[in-house]
Each structure stands twice: as C-alpha cells, then as structure tokens.
Amino acid sequence: MRRRVFERLRRGPRAVHELARGLPISRPAVSQHLKVLKEAGLVVDRAEGTRRLYQIDPSGLGTIRRWLDEFWDEALNAFRDEAEKEERT
Amino acid sequence: MRRRVFERLRRGPRAVHELARGLPISRPAVSQHLKVLKEAGLVVDRAEGTRRLYQIDPSGLGTIRRWLDEFWDEALNAFRDEAEKEERT
DNA sequence: ACTTACGGTAAGCAAATACTTACGCTATAG
DNA sequence: CTATAGCGTAAGTATTTGCTTACCGTAAGT
C-alpha cells in the first residue's frame, strides 16, 4: 500500500486527499504512509495554503538507484564467474 | 535483516549456515528469510550434498531494476516539468 | 466572525511479522 | 550401520505493523 502511495507521486506533486482518492484506505492512513516515506528520504513536502503537497525526492530515489546499480553489478559478475566455473566442468 | 541476508549473496552462492555466520539471528531464522526471498523470485536454491546453496536470481533482480529505472525516468521528468513551471513564475 | 477544507496526530486494536526452540529428514563420513 | 552435518518446518510468543475513528489546528472563503 505504501508503494501504491509512492507510485501515485510519480507524475508530480499531489495533495494528501488526492492520493487517498482511489485507494482503499483512509486519508489518515495515507498521511502515515507519507510520514514513513518522508523519514526514509523518499519524499518531501511543502505547505500550499491549507493543503500539503508531497512529491518524490529525486536525491532519495537516486540513493536507492545507486545502491541497486552497484548491487546489480556485483551480483551479475558473481553470476558470470559461477557460469564459467560451471562451464569448465 | 532480510536485506542483510540478501546482500551476503552478492558475491556468489552460499550455504545457509554460512549466511547465518556473523548474523545476530539463528540459522532457522535465516532459512525463513531465504524462503521469503525465494517466493519473491530474488533467489534460487539448489541442493548440493547435504547443503543447500542459495544464490541471487538475476532475472528477479532485473525485474526490480527495470521497475526502478522506469519509475526513475517518470519521476525525474515530472521533477523537471515542475522546475520549469517554477522558473516561469 | 463563521464555516469549511485540509491534514497531522493520538488511541486503540486486529493481524502480520520475526524471532526462538524443538524436531525430523536426508546425505555424507567413518 | 551409525553418527554427524546441514536444513527445513512447526509451534509458540513478543513485537511491530497498518489500519480505524476521533480530535485538533490552521488557512481560506463568504
């Protein structure tokens, strides 16, 4: 559910009640998910009038991306080494 | 903790008790994490004698990578659009 | 000034999670 | 054939989680 909230921010900033629309959970529940996402550095928020706009934090998302890229590299190299080892059998 | 188990597979296949070594949880706990990772399609396992070797499944990892890449693209485009909108102000 | 829209937080609760220990199975070693 | 190493699974349990409703504060509209 948290991922669904996050995915809804893909296309740009959204207010809390907008995010809650269409999700099978209450608005406060969405608020709580946003809080977690914010603490994780994945979103930032700003006040706009009575609303609060949330949007994805590219730097937070970038951190994950770099982690995954590095992980991917190592894992794939290990996989290839393993395949070669297999081939020599 | 599950991520730590997963990360230990980065460098290649490992037996369960190897993975458990150095982690602050019991071997059965590691087994349970591996079960979840396997159901998620992130690892594959094979029997080797009395041991069971686990390793990262590149195709499962690739699925995540593609998801993240696509997400990254969309999010960054939205971010740029937002920045331009800001600039015109 | 009053009302309404919007959203964060608290309290409460059912369900899911993440361990532990105990146990049993299978394959190798001696 | 027996002992041992390696693992998976079951049962039990404390903790965490993910929601709900109720409530309160703040900004904007009338």
Image (spheres, coloured by chain):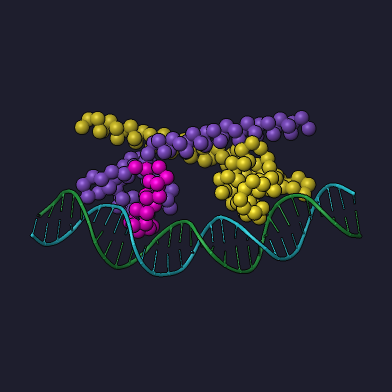
Chain colours: A yellow, B purple, C green, D cyan
x%, y% of residue D6?
Answer: 25, 52
Range shown magenta: B24-44
* Residue D1: quadrant of the picture: bottom left
Majority SS type along the magenta span = helix
Q: Is residue D18 left or right of residue B18?
A: right
Taking B44 as reference, is D24 above or below it? below
Q: Visible in this render: residue A35?
A: no
Q: Nearer the viewer, residue C1 or D19?
A: D19
**Count of all numbered marks drawn on residues in the image:** 0
Q: Nearer the viewer, residue D25 or A26?
A: A26
Q: Nearer the viewer, residue A2 or A66?
A: A2
Q: Is residue A84 left or right of residue A65?
A: left
Q: Which residue is depicted at the point 62% across and 52% down? A: A25
* Residue A56: quadrant of the picture: top right
x%, y% of residue B41?
Answer: 40, 42
Q: Which residue is depicted at the point 39% across and 36% down? A: B58
